[in-house]
Image (cartoon, helix red, strand yellow):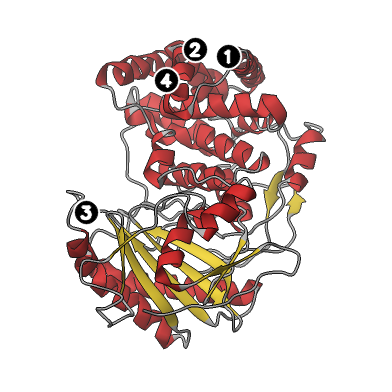
């Protein structure tokens, strides 16, 4: 077993020492803010004591033929990103997290993923950064790919520690840090309805609203009135949700769904496809009003059913923005990654996802939204002057440069961002503030996430072909004649 002894974090932060693979495996959910199921996670280590640095998460590609190229891209992304922010890593820790289909054959899962682990180790080695530990976590057990000693790393693996019994769990509880559950659970709260009857009724409501709203949004004279109606209805729904105390997470979404009719949801979803209306809705970002707005945006994202899946980019981006603004970085990254999965070209989601992943302070954008003068019809957007690089899938580092806020002018031919890794991989990194774990390698600072690069799947446009083209125009252009989707 590879022993990891001490590690240090910043002098003014809580320090935690993690020793060995068992404590590394236990610390992972606290580093990410959730249990990263079906994921490869790579963590950069700095210094002789192994301070945790940048973090990267990507859904495990389904096709083994993709593992080699993906490993090369992930290693390059994590190392180059770390060099820009904190210096070249002194080591890397790898986690492969995937449960078996039957919940009982974790060892087979471990063996199946072994070539992927080896590809990742080789890719890091080629870049002269050693992999100090590579773990597989499956079915409540963990295996080390780096330890050949069967006495401490048996073939059947070692059981994970009982929740709440480790030093990391105690430190997280003391700091008020909670682990959300699995990534799958977090995404399920934002995913479109799957119940056939409910989804069919919502789609019919969207079909009814589309022919009347789209021409008005495209009409410069009627557009302002549609925006006014959309924001007034959204404000009414936020007030309605705010007067209802949220239930526990397990049932809260169902309760929120019951408070909003199909026609109300359809009107706001379609109205938010206009970027200026969406920008004005972003001012509901703080305090009780912000939390009620977050409930609304989640509800609307779940209503983007069937061929309207791409329309979820707007409410998902707003959900990500409010989550980030209110300090929920894991939730923000999940929502923004799902927005980019719905529409990889959605510029506002790209900007927010990047800024969140770079560890920037949302207060700069909050000030901008509070002080918007409305001369462009919407608030200023935040952009960062950081480099592009690494796989579009999810790669990032912990901290970035200061946020620069400026007026963004549309560009007629903005290059489309595409994912360069598997289109089948689920991408939604998340992280949160954690105590500084110190392990024979890791000490954690703020985790970093990466940009979503899931390739978009073409979806049929709702309504008639003409209506579909017009809706595409509304979504691509904030106003007639501009050339970029925001």
Element type at mark 4:
helix
Q: Quadrant of the C terminus?
A: top right
The answer to whether the residue labelled 1 contacts the one labelled 2, judged by CB atoms less than 8 Å apart, is yes
The residue that label 3 is drawn on is: 100
Query: Quick one: label 3 or label 4, which is nearer the N terminus?
Result: 3
Measuring from the top left, give residue 166's x and y in whole percent: 49, 57
Query: Quick one: label 1 or label 3, which is nearer the N terminus?
Result: 3
Query: Quick one: label 2 or label 4, which is nearer the N terminus?
Result: 4
The residue that label 2 is drawn on is: 259
**Circle 2 crowding by C-alpha within 10 Å: few under 14, some 14–19, many from 20:** some
The answer to whether the residue labelled 1 contacts the one labelled 3, judged by CB atoms less than 8 Å apart, is no
The residue that label 4 is drawn on is: 254
**Circle 4 crowding by C-alpha within 10 Å: few under 14, some 14–19, many from 20:** few
| CA gap, disc 2 and disc 4 | 9 Å
- 127 to 351, vertically: above or below: below
x 29%, y 18%: residue: 200
The residue that label 1 is drawn on is: 244
Query: Quick one: label 3 or label 2, which is nearer the N terminus?
Result: 3
- 428 to 90, vertically: above or below: above
| CA gap, disc 3 and disc 2 | 38 Å
x 32%, y 80%: residue: 147
Element type at mark 2:
loop
């Amino acid at each position: 077993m590879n022993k990891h002894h001490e590690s240090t974090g910043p002098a003014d932060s809580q320090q935690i020492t993690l020793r060995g693979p068992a404590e590394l495996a236990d610390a992972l959910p606290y580093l990410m803010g959730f249990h990263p199921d079906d994921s490869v996670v790579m963590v950069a280590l700095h210094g002789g004591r192994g301070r945790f640095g940048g973090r990267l998460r990507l859904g495990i590609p389904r096709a083994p033929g993709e593992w080699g190229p993906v490993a090369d891209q992930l290693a390059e992304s994590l190392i180059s990103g770390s060099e820009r922010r904190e210096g070249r890593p002194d080591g890397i820790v790898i986690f492969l997290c995937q449960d078996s289909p039957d919940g009982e054959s974790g060892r087979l899962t471990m063996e199946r993923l072994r070539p992927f682990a080896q590809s990742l180790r080789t890719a890091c080695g080629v870049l002269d950064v050693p992999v100090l530990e590579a773990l597989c976590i499956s079915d409540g057990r963990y295996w080390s790919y780096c330890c050949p000693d069967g006495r401490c790393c048996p073939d059947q693996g070692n059981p994970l520690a009982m929740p709440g019994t480790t030093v990391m769990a105690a430190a997280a509880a003391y700091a008020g840090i909670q682990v959300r559950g699995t990534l799958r659970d977090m995404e399920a709260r934002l995913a479109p309805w799957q119940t056939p009857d409910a989804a069919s009724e919502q789609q019919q409501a969207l079909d009814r609203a589309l022919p009347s709203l789209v021409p008005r949004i495209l009409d410069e004279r009627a557009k302002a009135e549609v925006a006014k109606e959309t924001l007034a209805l959204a404000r009414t729904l936020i007030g309605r949700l705010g007067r209802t105390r949220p239930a526990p997470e397990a049932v809260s979404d169902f309760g929120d769904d019951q408070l909003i009719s199909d026609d109300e949801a359809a009107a706001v979803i379609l109205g938010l496809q206009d970027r200026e209306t969406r920008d004005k809705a972003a001012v509901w970002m703080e305090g009780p009003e912000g939390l009620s707005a977050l409930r609304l945006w989640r509800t609307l994202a779940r209503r983007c059913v069937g061929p309207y899946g791409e329309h979820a980019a707007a409410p998902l981006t707003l959900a990500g923005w409010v989550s980030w603004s209110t300090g929920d970085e894991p939730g923000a990254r999940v929502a923004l990654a799902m927005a980019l999965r719905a529409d990889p070209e959605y510029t506002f989601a790209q900007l927010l996802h990047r800024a969140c992943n770079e560890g920037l302070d949302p207060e700069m954008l909050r000030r901008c939204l509070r002080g918007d003068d409305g001369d462009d019809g919407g608030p200023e957007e935040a952009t960062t002057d950081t480099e592009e690089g690494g796989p579009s899938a999810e790669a990032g580092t912990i901290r970035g440069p200061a946020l620069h806020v400026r007026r963004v002018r549309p560009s007629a031919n903005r290059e489309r961002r595409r994912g360069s890794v598997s289109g089948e991989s689920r991408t939604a990194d998340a992280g949160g503030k954690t105590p500084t774990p110190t392990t024979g390698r890791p000490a954690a600072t703020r985790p970093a996430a990466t940009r979503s690069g899931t390739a978009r799947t073409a979806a049929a446009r709702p309504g008639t072909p003409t209506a579909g083209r017009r809706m595409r125009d509304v979504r691509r252009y904030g106003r007639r004649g501009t050339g970029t989707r925001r």
